[in-house]
Image (cartoon, grey):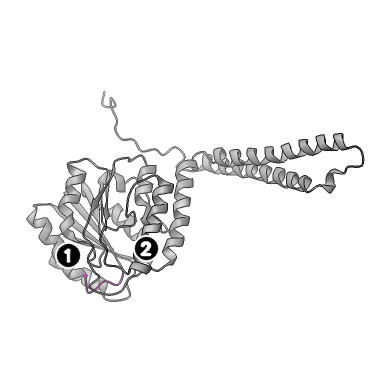
């Protein structure tokens, strides 16, 4: 297995690819790394794939994967992770805003300091302050508060991983922004951070807009829910249903006591509280039923007993 697998998702980056690959090759040769470069073309509409083919003929270390259409960065990373054979896997963007000069230190933090995952932190950025920098800071602040992972730049494309990390997670949808959260949910706790150089864009334009911040927040909530309750959905829906039902039940008891103290002229259905209680009890029952159905689905799932085993001992006896 090579020392390093470098996975580069790309979309319409024909201008930057030759310079990027040449830079990666130079850095790896200077540091005597055995390596492979996996270029994943996410359905580019320019000549990116022709450039990948040319680079593959020029360098023995370059491999390519081409999608039939654009599926998104998460899908590109997931396929790159499947194909990676290196002991350390490093990801970077194809637009030359990530510097390959960071590769040796990212490798050392995994191979020597024994981190499971190291995320880059673009402390000094060359993006537009209003449209990218400020939203990014707010976005990462919310991520830290919800996930509990103290990273300044969770969305940074420049990251390094132990091989077993990328083989233990599945990246889909737009979950590439939350790979540290997925890794933590899979049991990998040694997550570090490194300040990296952020370079001004040399070619092309950014492929992402404002919608990624809204979608990203929703994806984060999804990951947090799935990582905590995918194997035990009744714990969530059952607790919520019990509390809601009890709230309605308490209101009913209070109304009955009030009815007994005020006399026969008092009607339960004339009180707003009656309808609040009825609604709460119905919603609580629905939460309970949702929990039961989710539990049945979870117990019938093919991966219900799929767990990551770090080490086996004694099986050779």
Question: For this rendering, which residue is in front, 193 or 100?
Answer: 193
199 relative to 205, above or below: above
Q: Position of residue 252 (x, y in %)?
A: 77, 39
- In-image side of 262 versus 224 (left or right): right
Tell whether position 67 is magenta.
Answer: no
Label 2 residue SS = helix
223 relative to 199, above or below: above
Per the rendered image, the range of residues in magenta is: 11-16
In the picture, residue 281 is in which quadrant? top right
Q: Residue at x 60, y 39 (%)?
A: 238
Which numbered marker is on residue 164?
Answer: none
In the picture, residue 277 is in which quadrant? top right
Q: Are marks 1 and 2 in contact (CB under 8 Å)?
A: no
- In-image side of 289 versus 312 (left or right): right
Q: Quadrant of the C terminus?
A: top left
User: In the image as oriented, which residue stretches furthest toward the right?
Assistant: 264
Q: Within 10 Å of the Cα at label 2, are there few (<14), some (14-19), or many (20+) other Cα atoms?
A: few
Q: Position of residue 309 (x, y in %)?
A: 34, 35
- In front of the other: label 1 or label 2? 2
Dot 1 corresponds to which residue?
21
Q: Within 10 Å of the Cα at label 1, are there few (<14), some (14-19), or many (20+) other Cα atoms?
A: many
Dot 2 corresponds to which residue?
134
- In-image side of 314 versus 137 (left or right): left
Tell whether position 14 is magenta.
Answer: yes
Q: Position of residue 179 (x, y in %)?
A: 35, 51
Q: Earlier in the sequence, mark 1 or mark 2?
A: 1
Q: Residue at x 30, y 72 (%)?
A: 12
57 relative to 278, above or below: below
């Amino acid at each position: 297995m090579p020392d390093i697998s470098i996975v580069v998702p790309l979309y319409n980056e024909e201008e930057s690819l030759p310079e990027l690959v040449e830079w990666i090759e130079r850095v790896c040769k200077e540091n005597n790394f055995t390596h492979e470069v996996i270029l994943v073309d996410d359905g580019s509409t320019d000549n990116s794939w022709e450039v990948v083919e040319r680079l593959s003929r020029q360098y023995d270390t370059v491999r390519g994967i081409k999608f039939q259409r654009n599926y998104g960065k998460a899908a590109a990373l997931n396929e790159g992770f499947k194909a990676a054979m290196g002991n350390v896997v490093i990801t970077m963007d194809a637009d030359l805003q990530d510097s390959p000069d960071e590769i040796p230190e990212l490798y050392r933090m995994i191979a020597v300091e024994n981190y499971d995952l190291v995320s880059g932190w673009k402390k000094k950025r060359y993006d537009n302050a209003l449209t990218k920098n400020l939203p990014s800071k707010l976005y990462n602040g919310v991520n830290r508060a919800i996930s509990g992972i103290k990273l300044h730049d969770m969305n940074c494309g420049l990251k390094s991983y132990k091989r077993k990390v990328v083989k233990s997670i599945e990246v889909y949808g737009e979950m590439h922004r939350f790979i540290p959260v997925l890794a933590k949910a899979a049991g990998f706790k040694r997550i570090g951070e490194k300040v990296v150089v952020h370079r001004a864009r040399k070619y092309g334009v950014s492929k992402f807009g404002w919608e990624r911040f809204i979608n990203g927040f929703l994806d984060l909530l999804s990951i947090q829910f799935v990582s905590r309750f995918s194997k035990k959905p009744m714990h969530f829906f059952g607790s919520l249903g019990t509390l809601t039902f009890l709230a309605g039940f308490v209101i009913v008891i209070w109304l009955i006591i009030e009815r007994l103290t005020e006399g026969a002229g008092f009607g339960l259905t004339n009180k707003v509280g009656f309808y609040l209680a009825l609604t709460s009890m119905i919603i609580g029952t629905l939460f309970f039923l949702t929990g039961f159905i989710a539990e049945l689905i979870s117990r019938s799932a093919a991966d219900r007993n799929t767990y990551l085993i770090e080490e086996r001992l004694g099986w050779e006896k």
